[in-house]
């Protein structure tokens, strides 16, 4: 009997292997390596189960059929990511996802390594100065869906462990659209954080769109666009791609991008990936950064004759995830802004520079590494003008206690001074610091974008 069980197991795994290794479209090297490794793990685990007399280990539901998610140009990621071997869910120390839903605590999340300022040394992204839209979901209760978003699927706000940071957990196939990202000017920036963890054995892909539409509401649920940009990557892997559409035709594409920061790590891909996306449009040019790495720089991604007025996030094949072993796809800290500051003119000629591009951790004076591009620009101006001295003044929004906000603003100004001195070689004697807390708002603290604009750093020429 044992011999027959092992024979059935061998035949099943061989059939699964043939299905994966010979897909309809050629798989990327990394996707293939991942698949083969998963098959090896499945064989080892299957034989272990047989030896223990446990029986059949293939408990997952069947994944969708192996078809492209898009009819034009193909899906840059889902055609390359095929079903991997099923594995038992292991609730050990490296465990499952950790999110709090409606005050219910789950097991500890795997730690995410935070990037340092040093790793962003080549980061040249400069965020827009005027915040047009912002959502950190602080005004949405855990378990609810944010009012400023639209969807044709399902999602809810969650938190990780004891962190105050909130995430929109997108648990179903479909699209998710922030209403405040609209009527995009010729020069704008769009930033957000993405958290993914690949935990199932299914095909899975994520995407976002920037596009022009005569009726964005009517086109919201459509997978296919006539004019715009489409970006796609595979769940848990580093394979990605894009397509540029004009009048319904693909005019530019690349299905062979490799973006290492998007890949989940670990034998079962259980270690999550957290990526900060920075999107920068300058007329027809589009640049995209994943964390500190510029992954795309397309000179003719936008048609200057068109008005781009819609942005949405989406996923495919998440609906096939089992309830107890859900894939995870989340977004946080969405920032939409316009107009890069003229650093040299503002600081040297006008004597004052106000920037909202130096960002800090929540309720902290720790500078986020994606602020590097702005700090580098300011450091460059100060080096080119060695006799100039400046006062650095921190400002906060009105959330929290007045006294604590005043202290926080002073500490944040000091952090900026320390960064300019240690990272960019500006003499500390040329830099003074102060903080005003919430006492001098630039606009009312009555909306998330108003608060985002009030969280700023001023540089005043002395």
Image (tube, rainbow, N blue to C red):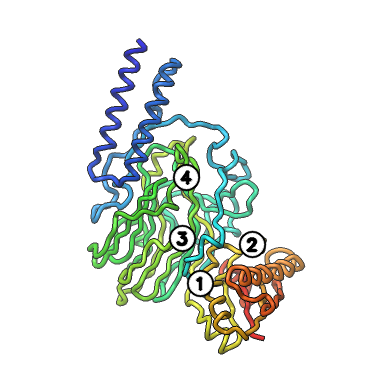
Looking at the image, tell me whether mark 3 or mark 2 is earlier in sequence order: 3
For numbered disc 1, what is the local secondary structure? strand
Mark 2: few/some/many CA within 10 Å (<14, 14-19, 20+):
some
User: In front: mark 1 or mark 4?
Assistant: 4
Of the pair 371 and 87, the residue shown nearer to us? 371
Q: State how far apart marks 3 and 2 are (Cα).
A: 20 Å
Side (left or right) of 452 relative to 319: right
Q: In the rendered structure, which disc, 4 or 3, sits on the residue that comes first in sequence?
A: 4
Q: Measured along the vertical axis of the image, is residue 430 above or below residue 49? A: below
Quick one: label 1, few (<14), some, or many (20+) residues within 10 Å?
A: many
- Secondary structure beneath dot 3 equals strand
Tell me which numbered mark, 2 or 4, is placed earlier along the sequence: 4
* Residue at image coords 60%, 45%: 102
Image spot of residue 104 (x, y percent): 62, 41
**Residue 396 visible from this viewpoint:** no
Q: Give the residue at x 58% y 56%.
A: 140
Q: Nearer the viewer, residue 384 or 231?
A: 384
Disc on res. 277: 3
Quadrant including the C terminus: bottom right
Residue position marked by numbered label 2 in the rendering: 366
Residue 236, position as x, y percentages in the image: 42, 45
Quarter assignment of residue 289? bottom left
- Tell me, for residue 132, which label it has, or none: 1
How far is the residue under mark 4 from the one under mark 3?
16 Å
Q: CA distance from mark 2 to mark 4?
A: 26 Å
- Answer above or below: position of 445 versus 3: below
Mark 3: few/some/many CA within 10 Å (<14, 14-19, 20+): many
For the residues labelled 1 and 3, the Cα–Cα distance comes to: 17 Å
- Residue corresponding to mark 4: 197
Marks 3 and 4: in contact by CB < 8 Å? no
Quarter of the N terminus within the rendering: top left
């Amino acid at each position: 009997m044992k011999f027959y069980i092992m024979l059935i197991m061998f035949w099943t795994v061989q059939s699964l292997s043939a299905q994966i290794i010979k897909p309809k479209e050629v798989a990327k090297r990394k996707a293939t390596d991942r698949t083969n490794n998963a098959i090896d793990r499945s064989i080892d685990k299957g034989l272990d189960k047989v030896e223990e007399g446990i029986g059949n280990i293939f408990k997952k539901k069947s994944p969708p059929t192996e078809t492209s998610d898009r009819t034009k140009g193909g899906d840059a990621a889902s055609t390359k990511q095929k079903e991997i071997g099923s594995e038992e869910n292991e609730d050990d120390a490296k465990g499952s996802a950790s999110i709090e839903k409606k005050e219910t605590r789950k097991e500890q999340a795997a730690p995410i390594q935070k990037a340092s300022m040093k790793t962003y040394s080549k980061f040249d992204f400069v965020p827009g100065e005027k915040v047009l839209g912002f959502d950190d979901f602080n005004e949405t209760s855990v378990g609810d869906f944010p009012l400023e978003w639209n969807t044709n699927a399902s999602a809810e706000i969650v938190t990780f462990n004891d962190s105050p940071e909130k995430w929109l957990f997108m648990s179903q196939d479909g699209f998710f659209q922030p209403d405040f990202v609209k009527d995009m000017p010729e020069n704008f920036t769009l930033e957000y954080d993405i958290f993914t963890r690949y935990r199932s054995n299914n095909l899975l892909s994520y995407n976002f769109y920037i596009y022009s539409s005569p009726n964005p509401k009517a086109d919201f649920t459509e997978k296919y666009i006539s004019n715009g940009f489409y970006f796609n990557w595979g769940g848990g892997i580093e394979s990605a791609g894009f397509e540029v559409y004009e009048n319904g035709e693909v005019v530019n594409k690349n299905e062979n991008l490799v973006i290492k920061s998007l890949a989940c790590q670990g034998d079962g891909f259980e270690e999550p990936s957290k990526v900060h996306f920075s999107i920068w449009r300058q007329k027809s040019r589009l640049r995209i950064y994943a964390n500190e790495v510029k992954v795309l720089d397309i000179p003719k991604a936008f048609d200057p004759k068109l008005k781009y007025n819609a942005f949405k996030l989406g996923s495919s094949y998440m609906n096939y995830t089992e309830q107890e072993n859900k894939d995870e796809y989340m977004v946080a800290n969405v920032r939409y802004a316009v107009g890069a500051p003229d650093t040299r003119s503002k600081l040297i000629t006008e004597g004052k520079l106000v920037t909202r591009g130096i960002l800090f951790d929540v309720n902290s004076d720790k500078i986020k590494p994606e602020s590097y591009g702005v700090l580098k620009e300011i450091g460059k101006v100060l080096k080119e003008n060695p006799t100039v001295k400046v006062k650095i003044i921190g400002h906060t929004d009105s959330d929290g206690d007045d006294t604590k906000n005043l202290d926080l603003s002073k500490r944040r100004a000091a952090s900026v001074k320390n960064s300019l001195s240690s990272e960019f070689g500006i003499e500390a004697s040329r830099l003074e610091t102060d903080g005003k807390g919430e006492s001098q708002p630039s606009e009312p603290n009555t909306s998330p974008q108003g608060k985002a604009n009030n969280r700023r750093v001023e540089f005043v020429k002395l």
